[in-house]
Image: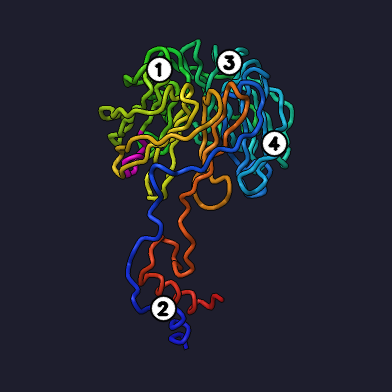
Amino acid sequence: MWKQHLALITVTGLTSGTLGQGCDPTDVFVAQIRFATGVNPRSVTLGDLDGDGDLDMAVANSNTDDASVLLNNGYGSFAAQTRYAAGDRPESVALGDLDGDGDLDMAVANSNTHDASVLLNNGDGTFAAQTRYAAGDGAYSVALGDLDGDGDLDMAVANATSDDASVLLNNGDGTFATPSNYATGDGASSVSLGDLDGDGDLDMAVANASSDDASVLLNNGDGTFATPRNYAAGHIPNSVSLGDLDGDGDLDMAVANLSSSDVNVWLNNGDGTFAALFDYTAGLAPGSVSLGDLDLDGDLDMAFANVYGHDASVLLNNGDGTFATPSNYLAGDYPVDGSLGDLDGDGDLDMVVVNGNSDDASVLLNKCARPCNPADLDSNGLLDLSDITAFIDAFVAGCP
């Protein structure tokens, strides 16, 4: 009986081949669509804020001292913003479930009030009034992660004036303890969290805009951190991101340098130390770097918001942690930060960029989604004999 069903698959001429191995490396994104934010937006991040299954947008607005929430209509278009008060000169926003109730809350770093605002989600994408927690001087960047291994999300804040990073441990309910501060380089402007030495806890990487380097602070396992090790970067490193760029299973480091208009890539030795850097040209004055598989070939690419180029750049990974020449896409006026996520639900990573002078966010939708092929039953991107095996297994199991 199963042979009759198997005959429904056309086997004649079946050969193994990759379906949709990516797209034109010079033509990843369609033209931007722009959405209004507050005045002088400085940071953007993506997450499902209202629980409807698509990615919404949160933006820190420096000149209006607030955060904008733009809810996704479900296809990569966004409703009008709702704004929530933060501290003075918010420079960075991060999302995470801070109070353990299953929805995403907001944390905002406020540079002039030297603190972080926490805004808890009401469960529907609206937010309660902020509670503010002291950080260091010139709180400029915030990241969330479980730093002490107790199951809740803590805060790390890079402080540009006091040249350090604050760690604020979560009390378990979305309130936070007094900060502990750890020295970094000068002008700490961006912080990213990840397990750099493979010991199971989250370490810190910090880009230092004034000392032209990046600091790596390894976690002692309890949310305290060792003395930093610094790596020389380009001129005015303004953003740091972590990801496995060379496919060897550990996290590498990418730093965007505002003044030298380039990006430094350090490959991890596997123990939280880093090999000699590689240097790649980015756009004009990259304000941020984001990592994600933009061309669907299985490795992490780089995307930049270019402050003076008024555009976004994409550098596709060659598969080994080296990168091709950039392709540029028009954004708004003074793009300072970007974030990647599947905004339209088609299976590839789109990009949103916030524009500091035009007071809006540019959405660039990715055109690289693999074509749907109903014969690819194991969803591995290949049309091969394993799809026949998948069909047989499903039939034997009684799947319709």
Q: Are marks 3 and 1 in contact (CB under 8 Å)?
A: no
Q: Are marks 2 and 3 in contact (CB under 8 Å)?
A: no
Which residue has dot 4 on it? Answer: 121
Q: Are marks 2 and 1 in contact (CB under 8 Å)?
A: no
Under mark 2, the amino acid is Thr
Segment tinted magenta in the rendering: 245-252
Q: Residue at x 51, y 52 (%)?
A: 347
Between disc 3 and disc 4, the foreground one is 3
For residue 3, above or below residue 349: below
Which residue has dot 3 on it? Answer: 111
For residue 57, above or below residue 223: below
* Image coords of residue 149 (percent x, y): 50, 36
Q: Disc 2 to disc 4, how far (Cα)?
A: 51 Å
Q: Disc 2 to disc 3, how far (Cα)?
A: 62 Å
Between disc 2 and disc 4, the foreground one is 2
Under mark 3, the amino acid is Ser
Under mark 4, the amino acid is Asn
Which residue has dot 1 on it? Answer: 259
Q: Disc 4 to disc 1, how far (Cα)?
A: 37 Å
Under mark 1, the amino acid is Ser
Q: Disc 2 to disc 1, how far (Cα)?
A: 57 Å
Q: Earlier in the sequence, mark 2 or mark 3?
A: 2
